[in-house]
Image: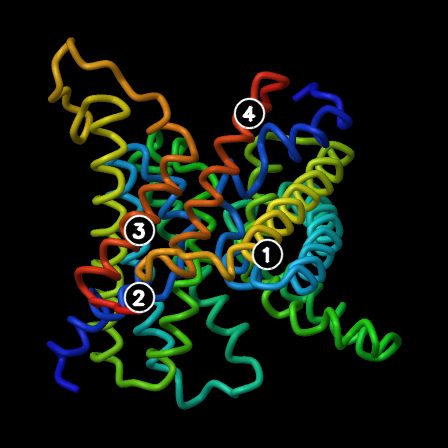
Amino acid sequence: MTKKDIFINATFKDNSIWRQILGICSALAVTNLMLNSLIMGLGVTFTLIMANMTISLIRNWTPRSVRMMVQVLIIAAYVIIVDIFLKANMPLISKQLGPYVGLIITNCILMGRAEAFASKNKVFDSFVDGVGSGLGYTIVLLGISFVRELFGFGSFFGFKVLGSWWTNWSIMVMAPSAFFLLAMLIWGVNTYYYKVKA
Amino acid sequence: MDISAFVLFWAAIFTGNILLTYFLGMCSYLSISKEIESAFGLGVAVIFVLIVTSALNWLVYYYILVPFHIVYLQYIVFIIVIAAFVQFLELIIERYTPALYYSLGIFLPLITVNCAILGVGLFMIIRQYNFIQTVAFAAGSGIGWLMAILMLAGIRRKLKEKMVPVGLRGAGISLIITGIMALGFIGFSGIVQIQ
């Protein structure tokens, strides 16, 4: 596989969220505001890239029996870096994201990519895979949060775009809308992108 | 925090359901909900692990991490405690109750990466619960999670013979059902608010 194939595969064809249904927790929880989604997406992308590269680097020296534990610890170390960075530079957003930054550790995307790709492939390929998976995750988060923020607050990245005539749909800020929007996204992707037939 | 543990227990089940309000534990919720029996087995295992690891993590946080000023290591320490306990539990169950191991054992590795377990641990720190509150919150969260996965498993069994649009089968329709359940649970939210 060329680098381009790996990238396209990770971002679109095997997108973690709509294809493999992984990492749903944070995709639903932080998507009520676009800014939070962007920061979360960047945090996950950073962790993915670094963890993928590290795991790939030590793949020949990791015993099979303890590899899960090693992978979790590597991921946790990078998540701590992300958390400390957010607390220091963006305390407000860090507070809004709350436990979901720490929960990147148990985000199935990280373990999934480590197990399925990084533990078997070269360092640079794993880097490309990390960038692609992170981008795919961020795109989905931004897509869902665009709809939720537009209808829920009438704004785009915090700027009011809909005027004073707009009545906020409070359902869009609450939990159920996240489930409905993600379901519709998966439905649309299955029908128009994978073209599944009965 | 001066909410009584009793209130916290009920609030964790109904008004702030760990899955329907905070979206934690979605991965195993979507993949293990095809049959009621296995959903129940996983749910019971989650309740047990949740209560014990939350209590352990609370003790570790306030008696080791805080006195030694290494609070920033909490993520690594929490995940090690959870993974070690799950591994330990697996050994014990396999050694003494093989029957239980065959029905429950396959779910145990899944629990380490269940976000609900780590999520409750992080919530208890952010909201500054004391020990009793933590145990009550963990028990309530586990029961709430079991309830949600049992409801979905029951509905999915009925749904097997129904006509569902092809692209929506599997995860899609499960998410829509979960959304409707979450909508129903908003009705409880007026009873008590926990933050």
Given this view, does label 1 or label 4 mark the residue nearer the observer? 4
How much space separates mark 2 and mark 1, taking CA atoms? 20 Å
Name the residue carrying label 3: A43
The image shows residue A123 at horizontal and vertical percentages of: 26, 80
Report the amino acid beneath label 4: Gln
Given this view, does label 3 or label 4 mark the residue nearer the observer? 4
Disc 3: CA contacts within 10 A as few (<14), some (14-19) or many (>=20):
many
Q: From this viewpoint, which residue is outermost toward the bottom?
A: A60
Q: Is residue B187 above or below residue A1?
A: above
Report the amino acid beneath label 1: Val
Disc 1: CA contacts within 10 A as few (<14), some (14-19) or many (>=20):
some
Q: From this viewpoint, which residue is outermost toward the top?
A: A164
Given this view, does label 4 or label 2 mark the residue nearer the observer? 4
Given this view, does label 3 or label 1 mark the residue nearer the observer? 3
Q: How is the image coloured?
A: rainbow
Disc 2: CA contacts within 10 A as few (<14), some (14-19) or many (>=20):
some
Quadrant location of the N terminus of chain B in the rendered image: top right
Q: Which mark is residue B195?
A: 4
Chain name for mark 1: B
Q: In the image, what residue occupies the spot 58% across and 31% down?
A: B16
Name the residue carrying label 1: B77
Q: Are marks 2 and 1 in contact (CB under 8 Å)?
A: no
Q: Are marks 3 and 4 in contact (CB under 8 Å)?
A: no
How much space separates mark 3 and mark 1, taking CA atoms? 21 Å
The image shows residue B117 at horizontal and vertical percentages of: 61, 51
Q: Is residue A162 above or below residue B155?
A: above
Disc 4: CA contacts within 10 A as few (<14), some (14-19) or many (>=20):
few
Residues indicated by labels 3 and 2 sit on the same polypeptide chain: yes
Q: Secondary structure at mark 4?
A: loop
